[in-house]
Image: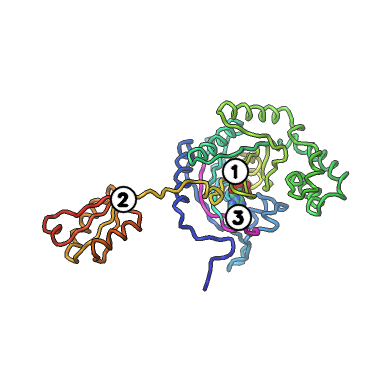
Amino acid sequence: MIKALRGMKDIFDSRFLKILDTAREVAENYGFDYIETPILEETNLFKRSVGESSDIVNKEMYQFTDKGGNDVCLRPEGTAGVVRSFIEHKFDRQATPKRFWYFGPMFRYERPQKGRLREFHQFGIESFGTANIYEDINIISMAADIFDKLNISYTLKINSLGCPKCMPVYKENLVKFLNEHKENLCVDCQRRITQNPIRTLDCKNESCRAILKDAPKITDNLCEVCENDFETLKNGLKNLGIDYEVDKNLVRGLDYYTKTTFEFISNEIGAQSAIAGGGRYDRLVEFLGGKPTPAVGFAIGVERILDLVESEEKRNGIYMGALVNEALDFILKEAKKLRSQEKVFVEPNTKSLRAHLKAADRGNYKKVLIAGEDELKKGEFFTKEL
Ligand code: HAM
């Protein structure tokens, strides 16, 4: 028997659509527009945006050469494709800010476990064209609204990675610290010292964590502008009643971030506890060849919150069935009218009343309309509420 690939799942759960509908409604109320980009992109797009030294690019890409000899890859995340599209369609040449929401599958060749799939879905948003920190507050508030609407509780963690002015100074301090402790760091962190030192800050290795507790923190090394923005961010969240924790090690696994980074964590779903992640990426548009355009965004992991969403197993819709074949035309005609208002299922096979009621009950319908010879003559239905 052929089965779905490891880490990939068939989806039947209607809560999936409930998440999409809720998130979409909130995003549209915040003034975001729909965008859908291709699932397959040039590999280089991800190498250059997510970063060559990131785990995603290094170890987790579904990368292959297509029949035309192009090096392509299934998207591991949504931001890079949206930025590519933003530049390609010359939105970077327009003065107005541009805000998008998207929903779709992402692919990472990770070791599957609870909450970690190889094909998973993200609901994401990207906001282009404003460097104002109030936009960061705005989008964090949007994510919080989505979780509130879905009745999901969370812890919000925030950090600032600084800007091209303060980050290099900080990196130098950090590299100095890391070199002093090099022998006791794991091989990955030893490699990160030269490749991407700030990624050592979220190493999962216990001995590295113990050492890095004493490492210099970026939030203690921010320039004046970044420091003020981080204060404004914290005050803005307080003002909206959104609780947060500052996590000085929250550097995130993608290389494009500057300034604000954040994650929403759930303590009800086990080890893979991040239900959303995002941040500011003011340099990525320019880095990918566009006009310098500040941007900020986030993505929610749909499968991670699926079990936290209440299912709507309430009875709904109408079940219609015939006791005799002659009643079917009458039933189909009535069903067509009723469908403008409600979900209507028509059972095309004739059955006994008892069998129809049983099928309607199993199908979770709210109401049953049955027609036999008598009903057909009178032009009405035998009706039962379930
Ligand atoms: P990310 O943190 O890599 O960020 O992913 C966002 C969310 O996707 C995670 O918080 C998690 O809920 C979910 N997720 C990630 N990997 C998996 C997996 N293997 N299985 C199931 N769920 C997963 C990004 O992707 C950025 N593009 C977010 C962003 C948008 N930043 C700025 N704009």
Quadrant of the image occupied by residue 344: bottom left
Q: Position of residue 375 (x, y in %)?
A: 15, 57
Q: Which residues are magenta?
A: 99-119
Lower position in the chain sequence, tag 1 or tag 2: 1
Amino acid of disc 2: Lys
Vertical placement of residue 38 versus 34, above or below: below
User: What secondary structure is marked by label 2?
Assistant: loop
Lower position in the chain sequence, tag 1 or tag 3: 3
Report if residue 1 lies within the magenta region. Answer: no
Closest to the observer: 5 or 363? 363
Q: Position of residue 250 (x, y in %)?
A: 69, 41
Q: Is mark 3 within 8 Å of ligand 1?
A: no
Tell me if mark 3 has few (under 14), some (14-19) or many (20+) residues whose alpha carbon lies within 10 angstroms of its own.
Answer: few
Vertical placement of residue 63 versus 136, above or below: below
Residue sitting at x 62%, y 57%: 113
Closest to the observer: 3 or 166? 3
Residue matched to label 1: 266
Report if residue 105 lies within the magenta region. Answer: yes
Residue matched to label 2: 366
Residue matched to label 3: 114
Amino acid of disc 3: Lys
User: What secondary structure is marked by label 1?
Assistant: loop
Q: Residue furthest bottom?
A: 1
Depth check, mark 1 against mark 2: the one in front is: 2
Does residue 153 appear to the left or right of 180 in the view shown?
A: left
Amino acid of disc 1: Ser
Q: CA distance from mark 1 to mark 2?
A: 35 Å
Marking on residue 49: none
Residue sitting at x 59%, y 34%: 136
Q: Position of residue 158 (x, y in %)?
A: 65, 36
